[in-house]
Image (cartoon, rainbow, N blue to C red):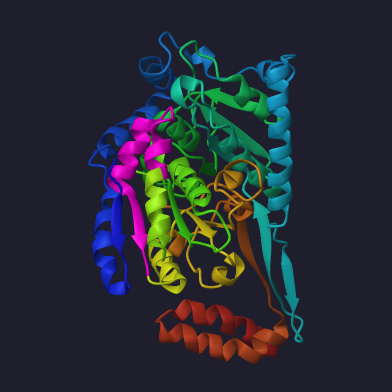
Amino acid sequence: MACIRWQYPDPDSWSAIAAHMAQRKDPGLDVVSVVREILTRVRAEGDAALADCTARFDCPGFTTAMLKVPTASLAAALATDDATFQADMDIIKEAAANIRAYHQAQVQQSWWRPHADGSITGQLVRPVDRVGLYVPGGQGGETPLISSLLMNAIPAQVAGVAEIAVVSPPRKDGTLNPYILATAALLGIEEVYATGSAWAVAALAYGTQSIRPVDVIAGPGNLYVATAKQLLIGEIGIDMIAGPSEICIIAEDIPGRDLTRRAAWLAADMLSQAEHDALAAAVCISPSAALLDAVRAELERQCQALPRHEIATRCLKDFGALVQVPDLDTAAELSNRFAPEHLELAVADPWALLGKIRHAGAIFLGDHTPEPVGDYFAGPNHVLPTLGTARFASALGVDNFCKKSSVIATSPAFLQAHGDKIARFARLEGLEAHARAVECRNKDQAS
């Protein structure tokens, strides 16, 4: 199994690495025209278009009557007496509690700033009214992304969103995976629809006979889902345009710690993202050639044992990289250029290195913080910026489901003191009516 080996002595080496990694941004598939057609059709035909697309791609014989999942089915899934299922749900409940506690700390309050002249300025923070969540069904609906439902629904609930609608592609028999149903019931969500892909996104944006339109759409999906969300920006708010998954690890050979064991851990972490997608990226940066050699050997050994080894192998061949740098400062500088979705700091003093990290979606500190703890359980959101967008974008959070209104209440004294300046400012821009709107008030106060 090939895995690229790079030397990065200084920033002059970046251009070649950047050019190679840029290939992940264009998989060579022209889906825009296909998605546009789907959006147009759903907008015109509503439920009929959803049923037809779902029958063609997910569930033969699917009808409009099967779109809405009965509320009783959600409750029944959560109440099942299967011991293994309930043990799994106990884990999901604990993860949900961690996620909720983390996001509650993100809540922003409205605020007011009084002024000496009696004026008040401030900001009003309010949740959006209605949110649509996309939950991928996984392989044939049998590997549902339960964690995505938690990570998207909980911050929306913490924000105070009153209505949440969930869409997810059905299995061949027209049903949704019971874990999706039970998790929705656990979260108190009652509006769930069995439909997926770009047509489900279109339904959430435009509305159909069964599905009312939403204000914000969040949740991961395939290229068709991502393209639909991108084309609908302006019609609705979205969480982000998510690209293929990625992990970057800064690691060093730590004296007194077993190099081979740590290499096995690092390889496992790289593979945790490589198994997602052939376009995923898995990069390990280190000053230690010996550690990078050991990681390469572990990647060879571990990859073949994975159920998704073909995907992981392709990812490592195309976008896996082991990069040797002269020191940890250079490693941090290179990582900031990558601006990765996930960044692990597997070094002796991760807190010291943390101060040098400027761009990353989520940062995992130390040998005992592998990336999956963030995917499922610790509490921070796993919906993260990819493809270098961590330079300007943030993890999904409560703010994605809120809007902020400026509040202005100026007093007569404020207008008297500043009206002439405001009018003059308006006339600099050639807007006479703006100026007069202020002057007429001051004129009336003076008379």
Task: Report whether residue 403 is seen.
Answer: yes
For the point 68% across and 26% down, which residue is it?
Answer: 88
Main SS of the magenta segment? helix
- Boundaries of the magenta span: 298-325
Quadrant of the rendering where the C terminus is positioned: bottom right
Extreme top residue here? 61
Q: Quadrant of the N terminus?
A: top left
> 85 and 428: which one is in front?
85
- From the viewer's side, name the closer residue of 39 and 188: 188
| Residue drawn 55% across the image and 78% down it | 437
**Side of 427 relative to 2 (left or right):** right
The quadrant holding residue 163 is top right
Q: How many marks?
A: 0
Q: Report x, y in % for residue 95.
A: 69, 39
Magenta span includes 73: no
Q: Residue at x 77, y 86 (%)?
A: 116
Q: Considering only vertical position in the picture, is 363 above or below 273?
A: below
* Closer to the camera in the image, 400 or 162: 400
Residue 224 image point, x, y percent: 36, 35
Above or below 82: residue 407: below
Residue 50: x %, y % from top left:
43, 22
- Magenta region includes residue 318: yes
Q: Image quarter for residue 122?
A: bottom right
Q: Is residue 160 visible?
A: no
Residue 61 percent across, percent down from the top left: 42, 8
Question: Which of 40/326 is in front?
Answer: 326
Residue at image point 40% right, 10% down: 60
